[in-house]
Image (cartoon, rainbow, N blue to C red):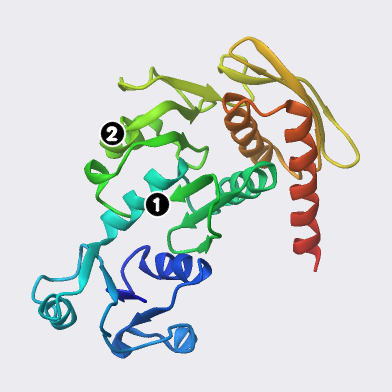
Amino acid sequence: MYYFIGIKEPGMLQLAEFFKELGYCVGCESAELCDEKKNFFDCCELEEEAKVVYHYNVPKDNAQLLKAKKMQLKVFSFEEVINFLITKHQTVLVLEQPSYFLSHLLTETLDQLIGCNCLIENFKSCAEKQKHYFVLNVTMTDYGDKISEVLYAIITEKNKDINQIIDKYYERLNKTQKIILAYGDNLNEELNELKKPVFTYGLQKNNDIKIKNLEVSKKGYVFDIIIEDNYYGHFDLPLRDKQNLVNAMAVIAICYYERFKAKDVSRVLKKVLRKKQKEILQ
């Protein structure tokens, strides 16, 4: 059983949901429960053999935390658990707010291709055991220098001042194993220097990841994707607007760098987007 202390702090409820989806029992103190989550937790008391997870905003003299240590239970910080999940997966860090469309689309696409879990702070989680990839969206938390290395990082089009975002998440971004993707259409100056390579994506021609032969069809957009001057593939996707087209470009780029075949990515993206359209209409 995993017992969570500080369940109202950013990311903690989604982390508890993540572990419940993995099949574990989860608990927290009854005083921390909100009405809509009263039936979610299995236990409100600390038990022998429980593993305790606490948020970094929880004071050191918190009664439950002191009790857990007195009981000699295994105690882990929020950062330690997040880093454990990062190291057990091929992780993509997405700096995106507030729609989370990109995080959803990337998760569902990678899940269809090979298997993917996700943790979107203050929004949702999706978890099954032995999944290959992990989409992590924890932009509200403030422990950037403590995060483990992720495979990729994406700075999305929601963030208009890219250099401000780079400065804020500098330590996190530099702990990227491969590359950083950044939305490039709003850039009015050179990107602040990072230790890791940065590739821009967007609809303008000066981006590293760009679109050619864009056409509007009855169902969406038809286009070719060029990545670092290399033709990747042809896509015909049921997208409603150019903002989501740009989000799809970031997903396609991750799939390119992970060497998925373009025809498989196109097929899966089309399937996922059609499903999303049906959900909106219902």
Residue 87: quarter of image: top left
The image quadrant where one finds the C terminus is bottom right
Question: Would you say 25 lies left or right of 175 here?
Answer: right
> Residue tagged by mark 1?
85
- Could you tell me how far apart the alpha carbons at marks 2 and 1 are, in whole angstroms? 21 Å
Q: What secondary structure is found at the residue carrying circle 1? A: helix
Residue 264: quarter of image: top right
Residue at position x 8%, y 76% in the image:
61
- Residue 63 position, x and y percent, is 14, 83
Q: What secondary structure is found at the residue carrying circle 2? A: helix
Tell me which amino acid carries mark 1: Leu
Question: Would you say 129 lies left or right of 75 here?
Answer: right
Judge whether 210 appears above or below 12 on screen. above
Tell me which amino acid carries mark 2: Tyr
> Residue tagged by mark 2?
170
- Residue 104 position, x and y percent, is 60, 51
Q: Pick the residue in front: 175 or 2.
A: 2
Mark 2 or mark 1, earlier in chain: 1
- Whether pointer 2 and pointer 1 mark residues with C-beta atoms closer than 8 Å, the reply is no
Question: Would you say 218 lies left or right of 187 here?
Answer: right
- Residue 188 position, x and y percent, is 44, 21
Residue at position x 50%, y 38% in the image:
156
- Residue 98 position, x and y percent, is 50, 54
Residue at position x 28%, y 33% in the image:
170
Judge whether 9 appears above or below 235 on screen. below
The image quadrant where one finds the N terminus is bottom left
Judge whether 152 appears above or below 63 on screen. above
Q: Pick the residue in front: 185 or 40.
A: 40
Q: Pick the residue in front: 229 or 99.
A: 229
Dot 2, how many residues are within 10 Å of its Cα: few (below 14), some (14-19), or many (20+)? some
